[in-house]
Amino acid sequence: MSDENPASQDGTEPQHTPDLQAEVDKWRSLARKHEARAKESFAELEALKPEFDALKTASLSDQELAVETARQEGRRSAAAEFGTRVATAELKAAAAAAGARLPDADFLNLTRFVGEDGTLNSEAISSFVDGLPKARKKPEYRQDLGLGPQGGGAGAGQVTRDQLKRMSRQEISKARAEGRLDAIMRGQL
C-alpha cells in the first residue's frame, strides 16, 4: 500500500506517536484559550453597547434625534399592534390544544400577553389557558341506545283503550297516521 493510507496492511489503525498526541493537545488548548478570549471580548462589547448608544444619541443633531425618536416610536407601536394579533393567535392555538374554550377576544386584555418590545409572554399565555375551564367532551357514541322509551309518560298524546273503543274507523286511521296509537300497538297501554 502507499504511504497516503494511514491504515496498516492488516487493516488496524496505526499507533499514535507521542509527538502527534502532544501536538493535538497543544492545538486543543490553544483553541479553548482563544474561544474563552472571544467570549470575554463579546461580553465586554455587550457591556459597552449602552454607552455607545448614549454617545451616538448625544452626537445627533436635533433633526436627526427627532427622526430617530420617531423611528423608535414607530417600531414600538407596530410591535404592540402586531403583538396583540400574534397574542390572539397564540391564545387560540393554546386553548385549542388544551381543550379549553377561549372567551371572546373583546373581553380580554391582550396587552398583558405582550411585552413592551412586542415579544410574547409565553408563560402568561400558558398560565391563562391553564386557568380556563375545560370544554365538556361529548361522548363518542350515543348514550341512549337500548334504554327503552325515555322522557315523559308513555301515554303523553297517545290514545287510551277507552278512547279507542269510542272512535270511528276514520278517526282510528287518522290517529294511527299521526302516531297516537303507538303505545297501544306496543302493548304499553
Image (cartoon, grey):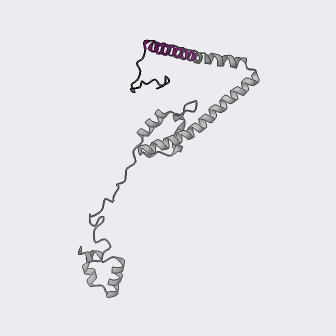
Tell whether 34 sits left or right of 10: right
- Of 130 and 49, which appears nearest the observer? 49
In the rendered image, residue 132, in percent from the top left (x then y), is placed at 42, 41
Residue 127 lies left or right of residue 89; in this view the side is left
Which residue is most to the bottom? 169
Task: Give x and y (percent) for residue 181.
Answer: 30, 78
* Residue 165 covered by magenta stretch: no
The range drawn in magenta is 17-43
The answer to whether 75 appears left or right of 133 in the picture is right
Q: Is residue 75 left or right of residue 35?
A: right
Residue 40 drawn above or below residue 67? above
Q: Residue at image x 31%, y 71%?
A: 156
Q: Position of residue 97 (x, y in %)?
A: 43, 44
| Image quadrant occupied by the C terminus | bottom left
Residue at screen point 44% across, 40% down: 129
In percent of width and height, residue 73 lies at: 66, 30
